[in-house]
Image (cartoon, rainbow, N blue to C red):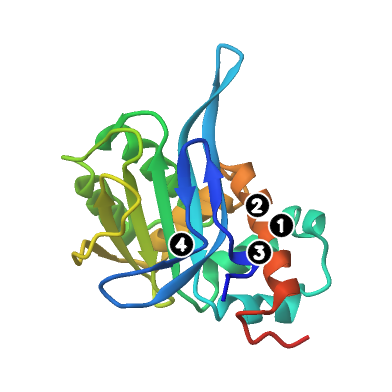
């Protein structure tokens, strides 16, 4: 049976995000919540550097529907609480960041770590434990190099474990990866992408639109009004 339109893939520049992916190490499937580009305005021109896809466990959708059913895409896009419920919800998330332009690991992680530390300090949850976790995050990227099409995968557990894996394409590696046990830092990574000071408004917009499509289809999910 063909997949419902709500779980169709998304293409950002030349980066393809499938509607459903399976993690080899666990066999667990994740559905594409949304995808969008991250870029900067340089000399008056918007330059796209990375494409970000956020995948969610299927139980995320009925969980979110309890509070957000009946809202419009604009209402969801403009609600910080909606995105906070995605960030902190009791379900696994898989985030894929794929490079549109080449970046070295240190170049990439310098901004990620800076944004995470800034957010944690702003909400008063930056302690020695978070500082050490961010140091481990930086260390994980030290020897990495990202040509166009290569990817970083962040797997976030509800308990707060953040697992990093690296790939030269969009394929999820089978290895265990780098594990960081720190819930505030784990959530901060996604917060910087779709939270108050999101680096990708396009990702937020796509998340809002696709969430409604998934709810409306209700083909693959046990969702109750």
Q: CA distance from mark 1 to mark 2?
A: 5 Å
Q: Earlier in the sequence, mark 2 or mark 3?
A: 3
Q: Residue furthest front?
A: 1
Residue 66 in the image, given as x and y percentages of width and height: 72, 82
User: What SS does tag 2 mark?
Assistant: helix
Disc 4 target residue: 187
Disc 3 target residue: 5
> In the figure, 136 relative to 202: above or below?
below
Q: Are marks 3 and 4 in contact (CB under 8 Å)?
A: no
Residue 43 in the image, given as x and y percentages of width and height: 56, 11
Q: Are marks 1 and 2 in contact (CB under 8 Å)?
A: yes
Q: Residue at the spot x=25%, y=49% of the render?
A: 135
Disc 1 target residue: 209
User: What SS does tag 3 mark?
Assistant: helix
Q: Earlier in the sequence, mark 3 or mark 1?
A: 3
Q: CA distance from mark 2 to mark 4?
A: 20 Å
> In the figure, 77 relative to 51: above or below?
below
| Mark 3 or 1: the one toward you | 3
Q: Earlier in the sequence, mark 2 or mark 4?
A: 4
Left or right: 148 with respect to 217? left
Residue 68 in the image, given as x and y percentages of width and height: 75, 72
Q: Residue at the spot x=67%, y=70% of the render?
A: 214
Residue 82 in the image, given as x and y percentages of width and height: 68, 64
> In the figure, 32 relative to 70: above or below?
above
Question: Callout 4 environment at 10 Å: few (<14), some (14 to 19), or many (20+)?
Answer: many
Q: Residue at the spot x=78%, y=75% of the render?
A: 69
The quarter of the displayed image where residue 176 is located: bottom left
């Amino acid at each position: 049976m063909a997949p419902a339109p709500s779980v169709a893939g998304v293409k950002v520049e030349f980066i393809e995000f499938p509607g459903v992916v399976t993690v080899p190490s666990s066999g667990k499937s994740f559905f594409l919540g949304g995808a969008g580009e991250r870029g900067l305005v340089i000399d008056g021109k918007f330059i796209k550097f990375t494409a970000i896809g956020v995948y969610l466990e299927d139980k995320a959708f009925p969980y979110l529907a309890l509070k957000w059913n009946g809202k419009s895409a604009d209402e969801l896009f403009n609600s910080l609480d909606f995105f906070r419920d995605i960030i902190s919800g009791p379900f696994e998330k898989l985030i894929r960041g794929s490079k549109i332009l080449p970046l070295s690991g240190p170049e990439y992680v310098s901004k990620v770590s800076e944004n995470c530390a800034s957010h944690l300090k702003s909400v008063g949850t930056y302690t020695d434990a978070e500082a050490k976790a961010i140091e481990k995050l930086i260390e994980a990227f030290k020897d990495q190099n990202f040509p166009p099409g290569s990817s970083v995968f962040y797997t976030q557990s509800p308990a707060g474990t953040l697992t990093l894996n690296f790939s030269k394409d969009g394929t999820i590696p089978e290895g265990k990866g780098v594990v960081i046990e720190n819930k505030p830092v784990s959530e901060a990574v996604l917060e910087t992408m779709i939270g108050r000071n999101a680096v990708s408004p396009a990702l937020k917009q796509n998340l809002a639109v696709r969430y409604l499509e998934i709810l409306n289809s209700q083909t693959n999910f046990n969702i109750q009004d």
